[in-house]
Image (cartoon, coloured by chain):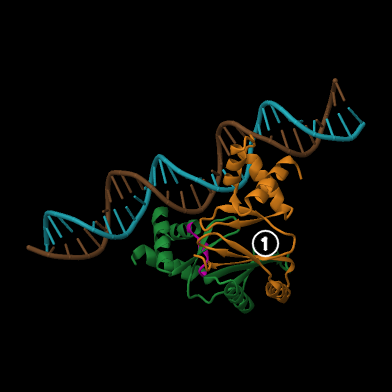
Chain colours: A orange, B green, C brown, D cyan
Amino acid sequence: MNKSDIKLIAVLERTGGFASAQELHQILRREGDGIGLTTVYRALQSLVDDKIVDLLRREDGEAIYRLCGDTHHHHLVCKSCGDTVEIEGGAIEKWAKTMAEEHGFRDVGHTAEIFGICSKC
Amino acid sequence: MNKSDIKLIAVLERTGGFASAQELHQILRREGDGIGLTTVYRALQSLVDDKIVDLLRREDGEAIYRLCGDTHHHHLVCKSCGDTVEIEGGAIEKWAKTMAEEHGFRDVGHTAEIFGICSKC
DNA sequence: TTGGAAATGATAATCATTTCCATTTACTGA
DNA sequence: TCAGTAAATGGAAATGATTATCATTTCCAA
């Protein structure tokens, strides 16, 4: 955890929602921070590794980042406005575990996302 | 629906309906078809528009395509050797549907992958 | 202070995807 | 059948996000 990591966490907290690496870089630049794009990518990568931020994908495949609490959860994402709801996935945890055992896999993790159109859109 | 569209459907059927545009292009080329990359992208785009194929995303953001109407399934992927097992996800379907309804989302889809180390590795 | 490791950022490279445009192919009506 | 037109095609260049490279700077312990 170094200075850049902290700057990015601060911006993510301030903006609340999602942002891409490019956007985060622009925001910092606009605020007078001379941080380089490379450093932004590196910091985000390390924050993802440390499970401090979540990495999702926009519909066009661009990576977007978001601070997340430490409880394991999944996302319900609106395809139209990008609005996101964190949801519990107890059923998924069990399913993943069962399936993995059934096929002799160990050391398992999983990803699961639901996407649709939210009530506002 | 033109010739290219049909070629791509054929390849997707043959490969089990899960490949990126680049892979599909390579497969066709390898088989002696001189189809251009541009045409592959165009055909896939039109198949997606016509809801004949689904567009998903790999973890790195690359677009992957699969035939709709295939029985919907998920993947259990070995992180070490890349081996993949197709699995049923009845529990997931229900979970996704329930969660979406609960939050007023409509027109929902979902992705779910399990990854771990297989018994051989 | 100083030597080395970690961090930084500009630049160039990479890779999927799109755009452009000239050429070919398919299709129409006479 | 045939000219004329629209659609399809594919190579090359453009685009845009992300990653690799590498020289320089900052940190920090001895």
Q: Amino acid at mark 1?
A: Cys
Q: Nearer the viewer, residue B120 or B74?
A: B74
- The chain identifier of the residue carrying mark 1 reads B
Q: Nearer the viewer, residue D23 or A111?
A: A111
Describe the element under mark 1 as helix, strand or loop: loop
- Residue B88 in view of the camera: no
Residue visible at 59% across and 42% down in the picture: A27
- Residue B81 in view of the camera: yes
Identify the magenta region: B16-21
Q: Is residue B23 left or right of residue A107?
A: left
Q: Nearer the viewer, residue C16 or B91?
A: B91
Residue visible at 48% across and 58% down in the picture: B21
Look at the image and say whether residue A114 sits in the magenta stretch: no
- Residue B113's x, y, as percent? 63, 67
Which image quadrant: the N terminus of chain A?
top right
Which residue in the protein does label 1 denote?
Answer: B81
